[in-house]
Image (cartoon, rainbow, N blue to C red):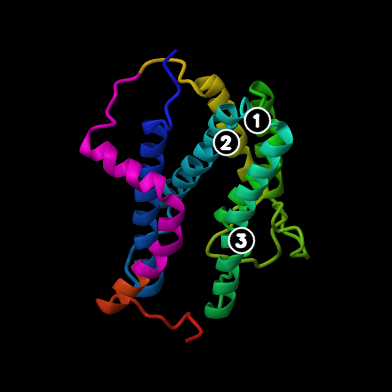
Amino acid sequence: MENTPIRFWEIDSLRGIAIVMMIIYHLCYDLYFLGDFPIKIYSLSWTLFQRTTASLFLLLVGTSLTISYSKLKSKYQRKELFFRNLKRGIKILTWSVVITIFTFIFLSNGVILFGILHLIGVSIIISFPLLDYKYKNLALGLIVISMGVYLSNFTFDTTYLLWLGFEPNSFFSFDYFPILPWYSVVLIGIFLGNLIYPESKRRFDIPDFSGNIVSRSLSFLGKHSLKIYLIHQPIIIMLLYALGFANLSIFWI
């Protein structure tokens, strides 16, 4: 096993790939929704592209949690680690609430009540007791997927449990990632993190492309994924509007 690096370049690069995929999808979605471009954004291929992008993000959340936890557990007591994790989750949740408020104020429809950032914030917090486990997380992940798939066959009269996966009747949101089934991907990421990076060390050697300009560029995006996530949609929408490709009538402006 090799020495523990500060960061694993391949994790940052994969997160950078997810960022690029997210920007591509949202650009096409905005062209369809705001510009009435003939893009079949709800087709099977685009749906798979969107879900693959989200799954990659969530897998990396779980994997990164295990790497960070393994790296720090020899330096801090478990209580201190819990509060570090809690602080990290609350930070993400705070930004997700900002997104909810923003969409509530400016959108006439499709308010984001529990999007992927909400899910990531909650996942970071509730995953702490599970970070030591490997195959138990895989099993739990499969259970969560099964429960989510079962729930997707129904709609409900209440909005109070939409965060869990109980989708309300006639519900529409531009970003909806409930705990059931999507938390399963984080759990599988935790499993993979403990399998591939035990004690925060890569189990096997891989070619080092960290100095490659493509890898460096992707790693840069990956290291700044939260900032990019928060600003990319306003930038895309403003650019499309400036170029005459976007109709902003869905906004309360």
Quadrant housing the N terminus: top left
Q: Which mark is residue 65?
A: 2
Tag 1 secondary structure: loop
The residue drawn where x is 60% and y is 72% is: 101
The residue drawn where x is 39% and y is 74% is: 34
The residue drawn where x is 40% and y is 50% is: 224
Q: Is residue 43 above or below residue 134?
A: below
Q: Residue furthest top?
A: 1
Q: Which class describes the residues within 10 Å of circle 3: few (<14), some (14-19), or many (20+)?
A: some
Q: How far is disc 1 from disc 2 in space, using C-alphas? A: 7 Å
Circle 3 is placed at which residue position?
A: 94
Range covered by the magenta-colored residues:
206-235
Q: Earlier in the sequence, mark 1 or mark 3?
A: 3
Q: Magenta stretch: residue 211 in it?
A: yes
Q: How far is disc 1 from disc 3 in space, using C-alphas? A: 23 Å
User: Would you say the residues marked 1 and 3 are in contact, meaning their CB atoms lie under 8 Å apart?
Assistant: no
Amino acid type of the residue tagged 1 in the rendering: Leu
User: Would you say the residues marked 1 and 2 are in contact, meaning their CB atoms lie under 8 Å apart?
Assistant: yes
Q: Nearer the viewer, residue 136 or 94?
A: 94
Q: Which class describes the residues within 10 Å of circle 2: few (<14), some (14-19), or many (20+)?
A: many
Q: Earlier in the sequence, mark 2 or mark 3?
A: 2
Residue 88 in the image: state x and y as whole percent: 60, 48
Q: Which mark is residue 140?
A: none
Residue 18 in the image: state x and y as whole percent: 40, 45
* Number of numbered discs on residues: 3
Q: Residue furthest left?
A: 213
